[in-house]
Image (cartoon, rainbow, N blue to C red):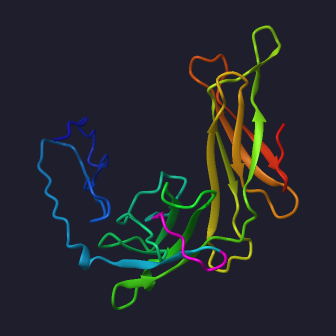
Amino acid sequence: MLVVSRSISADEKYTLRVSTTDASQTPPMTTSLAADADQTVNFTFPSALTLPELHGTIADSLQQPVAGMQVQATTVASSSGSPSLVSTTTTTDASGAFSIRLVAKPPGTVTLTATPTNLAATALPTLSRTIDTTKLGPTNTMTTSLTIPPLPAAVTVHYNVDGIGTSGALVPVTAATCTFVADVSDPNAADGTTATYQTSAMTDSVSGQIAVSLIPAATGNRSYTVTVAPDPTQLFATTTLPLAVAPGGYGP
């Protein structure tokens, strides 16, 4: 049972989204309705075997399978709202294989995303690729694979996080969560696959120092965006700033 505010007009509608507790079994179902009166809405989930299927593998740059990547499809991101899940969710097996089922009538294009989990190797990026679902074919299936771009080995970088205290002196910012994000895509990827590396670390409780594993560029500097979110008891506000990581690491 959901209790919502009554719709003001027929044009004002709610989007009702129903998901099962096991995301690997069937994708969510979505409907639009006006809340002009109490009503009952019935949902019947179709058999997963009747739904469109996307399957394939995820491999590294040496074509070795990558296990432990969570795979799902969403609507393509737009300025009007956040992407919505339109598939089941699965995890690649030891051979890097995956299979997901889309909603019965998927959008013309979806974003296929593979995100590393705790089961995956460390220092892996999230992969994303736009898929044209109109090419599913007569069997309602499509084979599509994702490849992690060639990347240098991660380096451990140490940073001191300081803030300006009330006296004007620098003081350590302790117990702050620092999130590092960088685009590590292969510019020569013919299929348009993008790769985003993200990792987090927390400053220690005394010196405000962190140690984090970052993927540098093969040459030159890799551009990261770092968001520092201090503990709510601190005097400092959350701050986002650019950061350059050299091939051998750099830790100011």
Q: Position of residue 132 (x, y in %)?
A: 49, 78
The answer to which of 72 and 94 lies nearer the viewer is 94
In the displayed structure, would residue 165 be above or below residue 38?
above
In the displayed structure, would residue 61 be above or below residue 203?
below
Q: Quadrant of residue 106?
A: bottom left
**Which secondary structure class fits the magenta region best?**
loop
The answer to which of 213 and 52 lies nearer the viewer is 213
Q: Is residue 64 magenta?
A: yes
Residue shown at 66% from the left, 38% from the top: 227
Residue shown at 69% from the left, 44% from the top: 212
Q: Quadrant of the C terminus?
A: top right
Q: Quadrant of the N terminus?
A: top left
Q: Quadrant of residue 229?
A: top right
Q: Position of residue 181 (x, y in %)?
A: 67, 49
Q: Position of residue 12 (x, y in %)?
A: 31, 46
In the displayed structure, would residue 162 be above or below residue 127?
above
Does residue 145 appear left or right of residue 149 in this picture?
Answer: left
Name, please, the residue furthest toward the top.
167
In the displayed structure, would residue 234 be above or below residue 246?
above
Does residue 85 appear left or right of residue 197 in this picture?
Answer: left
Name, please, the residue furthest toward the right.
220
Does residue 31 appear left or right of residue 215 in this picture?
Answer: left
Total marks placed: 0
Residue shown at 24% from the left, 37% from the top: 4
The answer to which of 239 and 68 lies nearer the viewer is 68
Does residue 45 appear left or right of residue 215 in this picture?
Answer: left
Q: Is residue 27 magenta?
A: no
Find the magenta span and give its range: 61-70
Residue shown at 64% from the left, 59% from the top: 196
Q: Position of residue 91 (x, y in %)?
A: 42, 65
